[in-house]
Image (cartoon, rainbow, N blue to C red):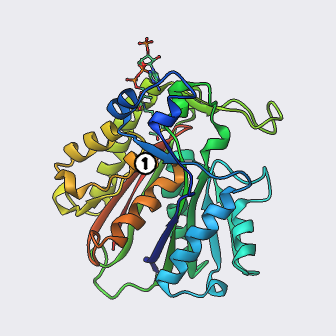
Amino acid sequence: MFRSLVTGCGSYLPANVVTNAELAKRVATNDEWIRQRTGICQRHIAAEGEMTSDLGLAAAKEALAQAGVAPESIDLIVCATSTPDETFPATATRIQYALGITSGAAFDVQAVCSGFVYGLSVADNFLRVGQASKALVVGAETFSRILDWEDRSTCVLFGDGAGAVVLEAERPAAGANGTGRGVLSTHIYADGRHHDALYVDGGPSSTGSVGYLRMEGKEVFRHAVVRMAEAVDAALEANGLTPGDIDWLVPHQANIRIIESMGRRLNLPTDRVVVTVDRHANTSAASIPLALTEAVGDGRIQSGDLLLMEAMGGGFTWGSALVRW
Ligand code: ACO
């Protein structure tokens, strides 16, 4: 079996920043409410004509440059998104085309806020069995396009952005099982009974229109804390590790209260939890690779560190990943 090494990461945020105060001019909200309930201070919003593939492409280019990998050697692109450019073809194929790649596989994975963990899991499994050797996993979203800008309970929570990682297959050295670098494990789950707690009220096969995001915030919050904790426990148990082994929590960035409760549960000091929700808001599938790229870029995450990623999203879907950097 091969092991997937993460050899590069990159991210992209649209230039346009919208503060809470600016949102308060559009809907009946205020900076204090948003900060206290969510930790969000601002979000980036894609410009008119700027599409999910544009964001994903910029992040992918940065990840490839950091990895020192030529685009043409990529034989798998997985794009995690719930806001594709078009119903079809996959946004991954647009990114593939823009990178000048004409071989290998490219497809989208749709697991909403768990999308990056799902995409990482899919790509990791392709590499493990030898069906691909170099993969790009992109999380890219333009949630601003599916928000009801008159619904204050949802429009204040999300932002646009993209992040990407390059995975390269390597045969782990003998005896390195569980201690070597790379993706140690991924655990992904779904329970479709909770569809109505978080969904978009449109689509090609239902209404024929794109629709808007609808959410029962309290219900999502309640499940997120429980489900992500279960996924984290599964990840640690599968690797014979304990919370004390984790160097960095790189969580999905939905709400500071959810993030902090997971940090407390793992007994991690707050400076070992990567937080971007204050500046990015919830960028769904893009939030983990955005946070990862920031913490790698500023030197917090160092080679050999153990990273725990966890996420939950509509479906419900949820999952975790352990990566030795
Ligand atoms: N500004 C001001 N007031 C608001 C706003 C707003 N933007 N939105 C709602 N309110 C009001 C409500 O109308 C309500 O008023 P009322 O008491 O007069 O009826 C009051 O604030 C409380 O509303 P709640 O919905 O009960 O607020 P809650 O404390 O549950 O916080 C929140 C809402 C922030 C959405 C929270 O439930 C949450 O974060 N849930 C998790 C959802 C999430 O993160 N989803 C992302 C996708 S899934 C994932 O990534 C995990």
Residue 121 visible here: yes
The quarter of the picture where residue 299 lies is: bottom left
Give the quarter of the figure containing the C terminus: bottom left
Q: Identify which residue is drawn at 31% across, 64% down.
A: 307
Secondary structure found at label 1: strand
Q: Would residue 92 be found to the left or right of residue 190 on screen?
A: right
Tell me if residue 264 comes above or below residue 140 in the rendering.
above
Q: Residue 193: tell me if it is visible.
A: no
Asked which quadrant contains residue 230, the reply is: top left
* Front residue (pair 115, 130): 115
Q: Does the residue labelled 1 lie within 8 Å of ligand 1?
A: yes
In the image, residue 116 lies at what x, y percent?
Answer: 51, 57
The amino acid beneath tag 1 is Ala
Q: Find ligand 1 in the image and state its quadrant.
A: top left
106 relative to 110, above or below = below
Residue at the far top: name it.
28
**Image quadrant in which you'd find residue 196:** top right
Q: Where residue 84 sits: x, y (%)?
A: 70, 52
Q: Nearer the viewer, residue 91 or 153?
A: 153
Q: Name the residue under label 1.
A: 311
